[in-house]
Image: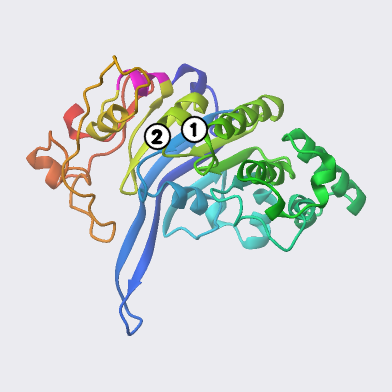
Amino acid sequence: MLPQYKEKEPLLQIKQLQKYFPINNPLGKTVSHVKAVNDVTFNLYEKETLGLVGESGCGKSTTGRTILRLTEPTSGEAWYKGKDIFKMKPKEFLSIRKEMQMVFQDPHSSLNPKKRIGYSVEEPMKIQGIGTKAERMEKAMELLNKVGLRRDQYYRYPHEFSGGQRQRIGLARALAVNPQMIICDEPVSALDVSIQSQVINLLQELQEEYGQSYLFIAHDLSVVRHISDRIGVMYLGSIVELAPTDELFSNPMHPYTQALLSAIPVADPKNKRDRIVIKGDVPSPSNLPEGCVFHTRCPYAMERCKTEVPILKEGTNGHQIACHLYE
């Protein structure tokens, strides 16, 4: 563990989180499961940004949604400020929920097209019983101004805004109840590069002002490198490597991480990078291989990789890795 975190209690602790979706036959009987999230463990600290990366379908978004109980977990624990939020009843969880918000991947579908954006920003405050109607309206206008929109745009509808503006509205809505933690589910993946940088800079400015912690889910490694303090790499529902950002990019240890980093485009045509090509197809999450889930595509796979599941273990410089090569 890094020195700056040794004395701190985690804001959020996730322990052996699993989320399986049932596969039913035509008669409605469950015959198998899609193992979307499979034994995920990590900590998130105050004022920290933890990036979560991996290819599409690896379980990043499901992890974020399950933490907030937008989908209920299959098993595992989630401790927020020392409280197990998975064991809370809905009414008890509502009081904690205002401290844990989410910015969704698709800003258009996450906003009600029939409601003015002012209503969408105010709604979390109304649910939590915060302020009077006039106070909620004033705070909503202040938040829109804070994220780079005009106060008079409070009265407009979602279709009257661009994708980048709608993402700013989603961020304003997340900030409405003064959360301590925000899960950002690919908040810039659908935006142009210039708009991406604006949203990323805005997130960093708001973090400096309000002190939130971010779980930043994305597949763009360049974006995650820019904003994250630590990065976790997911493959087929499991975290295979977790390390401080600079450490991960300078010393990637897991074969999957090495391949991911080798695929990052380089702007200089004279600077050629050796590309590591992973052979084979990604196994189905409904039929995971035994042992290490990456062994079917790993160039360094050993016999024990086919039978033993590697455990995420602490190494040097805050580096955690789940790989038999380093045991």
Q: Mark 1 packing: few (<14 Cα in 10 Å), some, or many (20+)?
A: many
Note whether residue 1 is visible. Answer: no
Quadrant (top left/top right/bottom left/bottom right) for the C terminus: top left
Residue furthest to the top in view is 270
Query: In this orientation, does residue 76 appear?
Result: yes
Q: Percent position (x, y) of residue 51?
A: 46, 34
- Residue 3: give its label: none
Task: Tell me how the rendering is colored.
Answer: rainbow
- Kind of residue at badge 1: Leu
Neighbours of disc 2 within 10 Å: few (<14), some (14-19), many (20+) = many
Residue in the image at 34% along x and 49% along y: 237
Residue found farthest to the bottom: 27
Give the number of callouts.
Answer: 2
Magenta-colored span: 246-251
Q: Does the magenta stretch include residue 204?
A: no
Query: Circle 2 is placed at which residue position?
Result: 232
Q: How far apart are marks 2 and 1 (CA)?
A: 7 Å
Name the element at disc 2.
strand
Coordinates of residue 263 in the picture (x, y in percent): 29, 31
When the figure is inspected, residue 35 is found, relative to residue 82, above or below; the finding is below
User: Residue 40, percent across and down?
Assistant: 38, 45
Identified at 47% across, 30% down, the residue is: 223
Mark 1 element type: strand
Residue identifier under label 1: 50
Dot 2 and dot 1 residues touching (CB under 8 Å): yes
Instruction: From the viewer's perspective, tell me whether residue 241 is left or right of residue 176.
Output: left
**Quarter residue 273 falls in:** top left
Q: Main secondary structure of the magenta part?
A: helix
How far across and how far down the image is residue 244, in percent? 42, 23
Three-letter amino acid code at disc 2? Gly
Query: Left or right: 49 with respect to 180?
Result: left
Residue at (43% x, 38% y) in the render: 52
